[in-house]
Amino acid sequence: MAQMMKVCGLAAVLAFCAVPFASAQTPAPSTSKFFVSANIGGQLAPRNLDTASSLTVYEEQATLSASTPIGRGILPDFGAGYRVFGDVYVGVTVSMFSKTGDAAYTASVPDPLFFNRAKTVTGTVTGLKHSELGILPQVLYTRALTDKIDFVGGVGPAIFKLKQDIVSGFTVAQGTQNITVTSASESANGTGINASIGANYNLTEKVGIGVVARYAGAKVQLPSAAKKQNVGGMQIGVGIRYNF
C-alpha cells in the first residue's frame, strides 16, 4: 500500500506541474482511437514464501518449516487501449513474471527410542519454479505536454494467477530420524488494485516510446502456505507504443 501511495503522489505532482507547461506549449490534440504497447522492465519487490507441515512419528510430533525467497526479476508486459471520449481510454495490460529458486527447510524429528530427544535436520530443495500472470484493466487519462510528449496515468483492479512449486511435506524412514522432503506445484488466484504513471515520446504520429511506473499487487492463498502471499508489487518498464 505504501508503494501505491508513492505512485499516486508522484502522479499528482507530475499532473500539477504539467498544467502550466502544457498550457504554454498548446500542443495539437491526439486523434488516435486505439493503441497497443509492449514493455520490458522489472518487478522490484522481493518476498518469501513460507510453508509448514507436521506428522506424528514415534508417538510424537515431527515438524518441518520451509522458506522460499522470491527475488526481483524481469517483467515483460503487453497492453492495448481504446479512446472512449476526450483524453480518456479504457485498456488492459497483461504482465508475466517468473523465477526459479531454492527453499531452505528445518525439520524437528523425534527419536525412535527416547522421548523429548528430537533431532534438527536442515537442508535445501532446489529448482522450485514461481510464476505470476497479471491481468490489469485500467481507466487511462492522457495529457499532451508538447507535440511530442504525453503524460499517462491509469487506475484499475489487478487480477493475478500464481503458480508455485512448494515444499509440501516430508516422510521419516522407519526406525530412523532421516527424512525425505516432497515438493508439489500449487496455484491460486487473487485480486487487488493497480495504479500507474508514465510518459510517452512520439517518434512519429503513430510510433512512440515510453516509460511507466506501476503498482500492481494482490494477496493469494496457496493451499499449503501458512498465510496469504503477496504477488506483484512495484514495477517499472520501458517500451514501445503504436497508435491507430
Image (cartoon, rainbow, N blue to C red):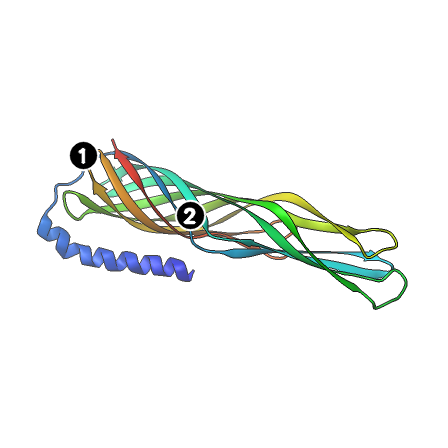
Label whose residue precedes the other's in the sequence (1 or 2):
2
Q: Nearer the viewer, residue 67 or 132?
A: 67
- Residue 10 screen position, x and y as percent: 29, 59
Quarter of the figure that contains the C terminus? top left
- Residue 22 screen position, x and y as percent: 14, 51
Q: Is residue 151 left or right of residue 67?
A: left
Quarter of the figure that contains the N terminus? bottom left
Mark 1: which amino acid?
Glu
Q: CA distance from mark 1 to mark 2?
A: 31 Å
Q: Local crowd at mark 2 within 10 Å, few (<14), some, or many (≥20)?
A: some
Q: Is residue 113 left or right of residue 56?
A: right
- Residue 222 screen position, x and y as percent: 61, 49
Please name the residue that numbered disc 2 is placed on. Answer: 157
Please name the residue that numbered disc 1 is placed on. Answer: 205
Instruction: Label 1: state its secondary structure.
Output: loop
- Looking at this view, name the residue that lies furthest to the bottom: 116
Question: Relative to residue 156, is residue 62 depicted above or below?
Answer: below
- Residue 203 screen position, x and y as percent: 20, 38
Mark 2: which amino acid?
Pro
